[in-house]
Structure formats: structure tokens, C-alpha cells
Amino acid sequence: MCEVSVISKSMIRLSRRTFAERIDLLSDSRKENSLARLNAQIKKLTKNLRTQFSTITEKDYGILKPYLSLLIETLTGLFKAYQNSYSFEEKEILKTNISDLKEIDNDIYNFRVKIFKNPEYQEVMSMLKNI
């Protein structure tokens, strides 16, 4: 079973932190370190989602989807808010992290939820069971 509560709590923490980042007007050096820490936490969440991928059910996705959507939206807002701040490297890492989260969201939906409702997939699985 997927660790839904652990993952969703992690997403909530990251969403809150991201929102706080947008409000907080720290010095440039502190912003840079803060964004680096945020990027590291996003990478950890991404790794956790990838590790749990094969155990995520449609029910799990129903729980995680709102948190994941909010996190992606908040991170995108942060990226846009600080477009002229931070170093190029940290912004590119953030952009990649957002892209990775969107990809995982899409993969979970297509390969852990939607595919099981596909009649062609069900037919193939039925044929494989008969072999």
C-alpha cells in the first residue's frame, strides 16, 4: 500500500513553505539558500513518489491529487514571482522540479488510474491470464 499520509503531509509542508517563500522578503543570500533547501525537499518528495509509484491506487491518487495540484500551482507561482531573483542554476533546478512533479502526476494518472479503465488493457490482461 502507498504511504499516502506521509506523502500528502510532505506535500502540505512543501506547499506551505513555498507560499511562505513568496511572501518572505529575505536578503538575496538567504533567499538563495532557502531555494536550494526547497529544491532538495522537492527532489526528496519526487523520489518518494517514484518509489511508491507501483503501489499507488486510484483511491490513493484521489487523496494525493489535490495536494499535488496545489503544490505544483504554488511552486509555479514561486518560480514566476522570483523570475528576476536567484541564480540561474537554482531557478532551473526549480523549473525542472516542477516539471518532474507534473510528469509524475501525469504518469500516476495514466499508468496507475486510467489504464485499468481502458477496455483494450482489460482485454489484453484477460488474454494473458488465460495463457
Image: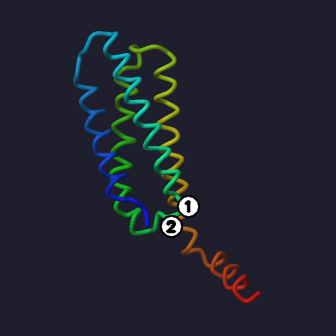
On the image, the x and y values in percent for residue 31 come to 33, 17
**Amino acid type, label 2:** Val
Q: CA distance from mark 2 to mark 1?
A: 6 Å
Residue farthest along the right direction in this orientation: 131
Is 21 left or right of 119, judged from the image as shown? left
- Residue 39, by quadrant, is top left
Question: Could you tell me which residue is drawn at 37 percent across and 30 percent down?
Answer: 38
- Assign a secondary structure to mark 2: helix
Question: Could you tell me which residue is drawn at 40 percent across and 14 percent down?
Answer: 84
- Residue 127, by quadrant, is bottom right
**Amino acid type, label 1:** Asn
What residue sits right under mark 2 in the picture? 113
- Assign a secondary structure to mark 1: helix
On the image, the x and y values in percent for residue 87 come to 46, 13
In this picture, is 17 found above or below 87?
below
Question: Could you tell me which residue is drawn at 37 percent across and 52 percent down?
Answer: 7
In this picture, is 48 found above or below 33?
below
What residue sits right under mark 1 in the picture? 110
In this picture, is 27 found above or below 101?
above
